[in-house]
Image (tube, rainbow, N blue to C red):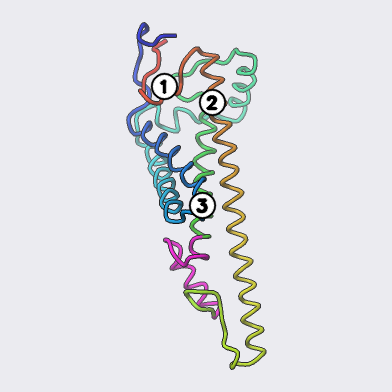
Amino acid sequence: MNLDKVRTVTVWDPLVRAFHWLLVAAFFIAYFTEDELLNVHVWAGYTVGCIVVLRVVWGFVGPKHARFSDFIFGPWKVLGYLLAMIRFRAERYMGHNPAGGAMVVALLIGFAATVWSGLETYAIEENAGPLAGAMVVMRADAGTSPSAPVRLASEEGEDEGLEGSERRNEGGAEDNFWEEVHEVLANLMLVLVIAHILGVFLASVEHWENLVRAMVTGRKRAE
């Protein structure tokens, strides 16, 4: 349907659209850089985290269709919408439909968890980032160096060297844990993003409406 020939209304405000596309760009930059371009990966992750925080705030103080109250529905409503969508009988919503609203919440929670696990990994591996200070305190409490894994001198005795080795192993286990969590969450987010894209495509076909363009222009047909 040609939107130039029908009456349209503004649904998505500029901030919602900016959050959406910046989040897309930042996530994919972070996903495809990782260790090869660590600084780029880190700053893309920071960007994702900042956008999530701002979007959550905007979900409470923004205009009608940006607010969580406009698109958060109960689980049965979401399930009913999905079943109706499969039968191509789903109701059209001006803002996010129930499934889309549930996806927004899942993405925000997932991105927040992914960023947090990344900050934990960054603090452990590089002693950098906002959690590095907490890591220094933890290492000091454990009797290890605040800036690196424990490395005890051989002259301090064989027993002490063994203790240092055990501590290194413990630090390595923590390092591996957060690194694996971060990787799993990042891959899960990729799956959710793909599912979101498929959902947008299906809704666009069902309602004869270009939802991608709507997120660019902010406008959808009025009826």
* Mark 1 in CB contact with mark 3 (< 8 angstroms): no
Q: Residue placed farthest to the front in the image?
A: 36
Q: Quadrant of the N terminus?
A: top left
- Cα distance in 3D space between marks 1 and 3: 30 Å
Q: Nearer the viewer, mark 2 or mark 1?
A: 1
Along the polypeptide, which appears first: circle 1 or circle 3?
3
Span of residues in magenta = 122-143
Q: Quadrant of the C terminus?
A: top left
Q: Position of residue 5 (x, y in %)?
A: 36, 6
- Tell me the residue at 62%/22% (across/down): 80
Mark sitting on residue 98: 2
Q: Magenta includes 69?
A: no
Residue beneath disc 3? 34
For badge 2, the amino acid type reads Pro
Q: Position of residue 203 (x, y in %)?
A: 54, 19
From the viewer's perspective, is residue 50 above or below residue 104? below
Q: Magenta includes 134?
A: yes
Toward the viewer: 135 or 158? 158
- Tell me the residue at 36%/13% (across/down): 8
Residue beneath disc 1? 213
- Tell me the residue at 43%/48% (across/down): 44
Along the polypeptide, which appears first: circle 2 or circle 1?
2
Question: Is residue 172 found left or right of 129 in the rendered image?
Answer: right
Q: Residue placed farthest to the left in the image?
A: 14
